[in-house]
């Protein structure tokens, strides 16, 4: 299983606020489309983003109430969109017109679906870019997801 580390509160927003897009400066590899990825909450916190989420009405905890250094959720990476470069989707998914979403920030939006917050976020070290979860951490993730999700690779 591959993982992506997000600065808080964005990992929290994916896991608990319905954020279906992760904004990046690069597109994911096409072979990853349709697969479940782990969303890792990094140790860095963007306090301005917390204030921004609260201003628009989201109930977002403060820095000490956010998960840090743990895998907080998983999601299926269903595609990506990049204005001027196009949209790439996993088989069976339709273009959600991500650029009209309030979560859109670009330049490349990774499109997430079937998000599941872990009831017990799993401590592990994150990394920049897309990284591979160790077999023992992956087993712990799948144990928490058992019976909740279809296996997508």
Image: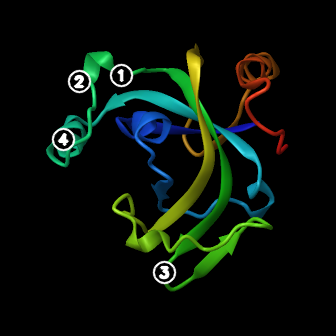
- Distance (Cα) linking label 1 and label 4: 14 Å
Whole-percent x and y of residue 1? 77, 36
Q: CA distance from mark 3 to mark 2?
A: 33 Å
- Indicate whether 85 appears above or below 77: below
The residue at 58%/31% (across/down) is 73
Residue ID at (19%, 46%):
52
Q: Quadrant of residue 49?
A: top left
The local crowd at label 2, few if under 14, some if 14 to 19, many if 20 or more residues have their Cα within 10 Å, is some
Contact check, label 3 and label 2, Cβ < 8 Å = no
* Mark 4: secondary structure: helix
Are discs 2 and 1 less than 8 Å apart at CB?
yes
Find the distance from the CA under tag 4 to the CA under tag 2.
11 Å
Report the residue marked by disc 4. 48
Residue at disc 3, secondary structure: loop
Tell which tag, 1 or 4, sits nearer the viewer: 1
* Label 3 vs 2, first from the N-terminus: 2
Marked residue nearer the N-terminal end (4 or 2):
4
The C terminus - image quarter: top right
Q: How far apart, in angstroms, are the residues tagged by discs 3 and 4? A: 26 Å
| Residue tagged 1 | 66
At x 67%, y 73%, the residue is: 88
Visible residue check, residue 29: yes
Task: Say whether residue 125 is visible.
Answer: no
Kindly indicate whether the residue at mark 1 contacts the one at mark 3 (C-beta within 8 angstroms).
Answer: no
Percent x, y of residue 66: 35, 22
On the image, numbered disc 2 is attached to which residue? 62
Label 2 SS: loop
Label of residue 83 in the image = 3
* Mark 1 vs 4, N-terminal side: 4
Residue 47, percent across and down? 21, 34
């Amino acid at each position: 299983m591959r993982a992506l580390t997000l600065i808080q509160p964005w990992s929290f927003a994916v896991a608990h606020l319905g954020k279906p897009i992760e904004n990046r400066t690069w597109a994911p590899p096409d072979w990853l489309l349709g697969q479940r990825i782990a969303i890792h909450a990094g140790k860095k916190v963007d306090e301005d983003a917390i204030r921004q989420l609260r201003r628009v009405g989201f109930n977002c905890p403060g820095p000490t109430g956010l998960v840090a250094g743990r895998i907080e959720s998983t999601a299926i990476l269903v595609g990506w969109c990049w204005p001027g470069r196009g949209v790439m989707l996993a088989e069976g998914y339709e273009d959600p017109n991500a650029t009209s979403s309030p979560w859109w920030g670009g330049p490349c939006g990774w499109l997430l679906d079937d998000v599941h917050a872990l009831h017990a976020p799993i401590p592990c070290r994150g990394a920049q870019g897309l990284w591979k979860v160790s077999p023992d951490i992956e087993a712990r993730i799948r144990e928490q997801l058992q019976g909740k999700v279809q296996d997508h690779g």
